[in-house]
Image: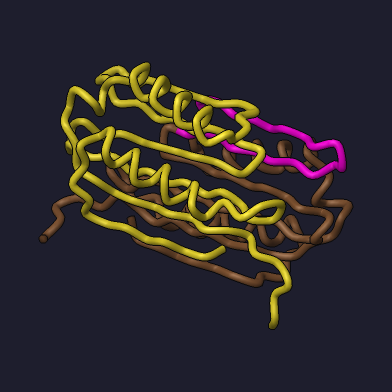
Chain colours: A brown, B yellow
Amino acid sequence: MTRTYDPGMHIASTFTSEEQLLTNKEGCREFFNGLILELSLHKVGEVYYAFPNGAFTAVICLTESHISIHTWPEHKLATFDVFLSNFTTNNTHKTQTIYNRTLGYFNAVETNKHEILR
Amino acid sequence: MTRTYDPGMHIASTFTSEEQLLTNKEGCREFFNGLILELSLHKVGEVYYAFPNGAFTAVICLTESHISIHTWPEHKLATFDVFLSNFTTNNTHKTQTIYNRTLGYFNAVETNKHEILR
């Protein structure tokens, strides 16, 4: 089937990080907010939820699609994914920027990565 | 690297559907709420956002990770993904159930699927 559209790139990453970062929900929110502003993306809602042990889970809903992160400080790791659609404009470079900057923020050592074309 | 943990299965799907379903944000919310209840998952927040043309975008934050859907009625398609972690219990079967039931609800014809182990 020939597709006449390009849904966009979705990157899913699992990485190890430091407990201090994996339990800093508000620091992560500030980081993502700055990145969304810098990249001129459009947030339409978000959920940040902290678990009793300090782990947090977050999903950020964008008009361009979403970002999510789930941290597991007890395993010293996080699962993170970002998907920006390409329907109205090509956002692939922004998807890669969010991915790279997030791994930078978390001082991450990646254990698993999937870069998929939706 | 030998991993002693299993982050879980993430399924990302792109499918075509009918305009009537791709613009029914509240119908989709009711469907997901029923499925989350039936599968004994734990929702900790959600965002459902409607665009002026009736398209909608939704992310559901679960203690088990997340579900997201972004609809494009102008292209008669949706991008959908579900990720449930396996750290506390093996949720792979539930991930597959959510995937199958969502495609059923949307009377979907799939154009793209990625089933990845995080």
**Is A107 left or right of B109, judged from the image as shown?**
right
Classify the position of the N terminus of chain B by image quarter.
Answer: bottom right
Q: Is residue A100 above or below residue A50?
A: below
**Is A18 left or right of A93, judged from the image as shown?**
right
Q: How many marks?
A: 0
Residue B18 rendering spot, x and y as whole percentages: 16, 31
Q: Nearer the viewer, residue A74 or A107?
A: A74
Q: Nearer the viewer, residue B76 or B99?
A: B99
Q: Which residues are magenta?
A: A44-62
Residue A61 rendering spot, x and y as whole percentages: 51, 33
Residue B116 rendering spot, x and y as whole percentages: 47, 64
Classify the position of the C terminus of chain B by image quarter.
Answer: bottom right
Q: Is residue B4 above or below residue A80?
A: below
Could you tell me which residue is drawn at 65 percent across and 72 percent down?
Answer: A111
B100 within the magenta span: no
Could you tell me which residue is drawn at 34 percent across and 38 percent down?
Answer: B102
Residue located farthest toward the bottom when viewing the structure as drawn: B1
Kindly report the secondary structure that dominates the magenta region of the rendered protein.
strand
Could you tell me which residue is drawn at 87 percent across and 55 percent down?
Answer: A19
Could you tell me which residue is drawn at 67 percent across and 47 percent down?
Answer: A70
Q: Is residue B83 above or below residue B50?
A: below
Q: Is residue A87 above or below residue B111?
A: above
Q: Nearer the viewer, residue B20 or A63?
A: B20
**Is A7 left or right of A79, judged from the image as shown?**
left
Residue A115, by quadrant, is bottom left
Residue A4 rendering spot, x and y as whole percentages: 14, 52
**Is B25 left or right of A40, judged from the image as shown?**
left
Residue B75, by quadrant, is top left
